[in-house]
Image: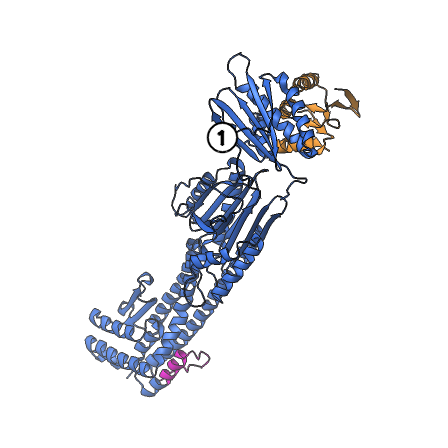
Chain colours: A orange, B blue
Amino acid sequence: MELRNENGVNILSMPPKIDVLMAPEIEKKLLELVEANLTPLACDFAECNYISSAGLRVLLVTSKKMKVKNADFYLFGMKPEVFSSFRLAGFDQIMNIKN
Amino acid sequence: MKNPLKFIPLILQVVFVFIIGTSIISYLHQSSISKVLDEMGEQLFCERVKDIQETINDLGWAKDDLQSRLNHILDCSEIKRNHFIVEICAKTAVDSTKLCRIVYDPDTKNTNGDVIIITAEPKVLNTIKDEINKVTQHGIIIIECVMMLALAWSFFTILRIVRSIKALAEGKLSTPIKEETSSADAYWLSTSLCTLKKNILELIAKEADTKVLERSANIELDIARNIQQDFLVSDFKISDTKGGLDVFAHLETCPKIGGDFYDIFKLDNAHVYLGVGDAKGTGIPATFAMVIAKTMIHNLIHKHRHTGQAITSVGNELSGQKAKGCISLFSAIINIHTGETKYALGGGIKAYIFRGSQRKFEAIRGEEIIPGEVADTVYSESEFKVEAQDTLIILSNAFFHLMGKNKMLIKETELLQILENNISETTEILTTKFYKSVKELRGDNDPIDDLTACIFRSKNIIESYPESVPPYATNIELNNSLQSLPELNAWSEEFNEQHHVPAEYRMPIALVLEEWFVNIVSYAYTDAQPHKIKVSTWVNDNYLWLRFEDDGIPYDPTARNEFDTDIPLEQRNIGGLGIHFIRQTMDIFRYKNENGKNIVTIMKHITPTQPTM
């Protein structure tokens, strides 16, 4: 997971597979960034092919924390099959997803 | 002799008035003026009122509202009539205490309107009343003048005045009425006739207002028609030849707009919702009941997937409203792969399954009380199963109240025979032929309510559901640890590769495997002992099966409530999302507990391209 800064936005690259085994690692990293007040924060899904409910949970937790801080957080670059998991969960309605 | 009557004792005066009055009434009767009177009265007071009342009865739902509007109009003319009486009273210098007014209650339906006669004796009054009733029930104002006529003394004046009355009675309102000056009574009578004419003209103008009301009723029907048509297309079709799903619905609105609707949508990959509604009454009220019911059920089914609860809620909503509305409802959630259907039915909609194997119709039973009719009625959910060769047919109530060309009600058996004769057709052709044949049977008799038909068939329905793992299945046993997940994934990928499972299905299959495996590992065991989770997979025709077997605590995931995807971010919880994914992406999701083991069977129907709806 690589963190880069593009035009003042902190961007974290998502791994190809976000399953129950990968989720804790992403959660740890994202929460670090939230704690460090790195805003705006974004997740780049360009490399990601798979996300399960465990991965969605991490993004939900992060979104909630960012909202409490009133900080900008968004997801982008999703492939259709990954976006469909977000859509099935109804997360496309409550999270900021840019494509 | 300005007023000869004043020299006659009161009782004789009354008798005199009576005799002359009745003789003139009988004269009017003979000259068939009474008929004209009757007709005029009818036209002025009754016909339109009756029309409006019938319209109101038909409208049903907004009765309170329209009734008050109608009353308002009647009140106006009532005031006008009262005013008229006072006017006559003043002009004829008749003591108002000698004016007796009999009001017939319109509710008793004896007569419509007021009868005013001049008298002081109740006995005579009754006799005159009877006489009046003999002649007409409605020619009230004219009769009143006839009575006054008796007060006029000059014969020639009478003739002229009689002619004026005749002209009035025949509806020749343009005929001028001469102002009589031969006596004060004649003068007052003729001027009263002028006033009468003025009042009749006003009443006619009022009748024109009634026509405006009628016209507004037509506008209302147009609005109702527009709402209904905007709300749904008249035809709906799912024709998926590859997948075998074949659904068609048609709605034919009746002239008065019956408030029917149908609603068909895909709940998830495996479930189709079919709904048909048939509001009682017509016009805007029926249309509103339809809109409320359709919207509520649509949302409730998406949320809870319970047909009985949805109909019960609609019933409570409608019965709780001030303006009563009720609507027959059929709701069904059909698994297009297993044919297993959960449904609820309330009111007069009829549903049948045509059993292809036996060539026989099976009627689907429901609750007869129309939702909204009786508060707190509970509509329960029941089940039936549709087989691949079966056809499910839902017909709105109006089909069973159609008048045939031969003036006989079209029978249910006739309707079913038409359906059976065309059962081998696609649902679209079957529907078209059905409507055509019904039209031939009924000829020019308009239906009293909308005609809605919804026909469902699925050739996808699997012949038999596997109760156990077939011998050709591929199996794996895993430790109850999340660390076993890569092993499960690799095993599944190898299987998919070998069986050429199309790429678009592999992500959902991996997702489902992870979700259910993680669920078992996380929640099934309360001890720290190692357990084995057995997973099997096999392909049979175009069906890919997954089966999980664990010895954890019994838990039926299929019984879990629907995951609510409408909750705002702050209140969101992730619990149940995995099960939601399985439901949404797979075609069969079944649970059983056998020999103390949890067995979850999942099926995905695999076609080169996904069915689209």
Q: Which residue of the protein is positioned furthest toward the bottom in this rendering?
A: B156
Question: Whole-percent x and y of residue A29?
Answer: 70, 17
Give the residue pinned by disc 1.
Answer: B559
Residue A43 counted in the magenta span: no
Residue B163 counted in the magenta span: yes
Image quarter where the C terminus of chain B lies is top right
Q: Is residue B219 at all visible to an observer of this figure?
A: no
Depth order, front residue of B271/B387: B387
Question: Whole-percent x and y of residue B601?
Answer: 55, 30
Question: Whole-percent x and y of residue B585?
Answer: 61, 34
Q: Is residue B212 above or below residue B510?
A: below
Q: Which residue is drawn at 26% across and 69% down?
A: B98
Q: How many tags in the picture? A: 1
Q: Which residue of the protein is positioned furthest toward the right in this rendering?
A: A7
Which residues fall within the magenta stretch?
Answer: B160-182
Amino acid, disc 1: Ala
Question: Whole-percent x and y of residue B597?
Answer: 49, 22
Letter of the chain that mark 1 sits on in the rendering = B
Dot 1 lies on which element?
Answer: helix
Q: Which residue of the protein is positioned furthest toward the front in this rendering?
A: B471
Depth order, front residue of B172/B39: B39
Image quarter where the N terminus of chain B lies is bottom left
Where on the picture, by quarter, is residue B504?
Answer: top right
Q: Which residue is drawn at 38% across and 45% down?
A: B374
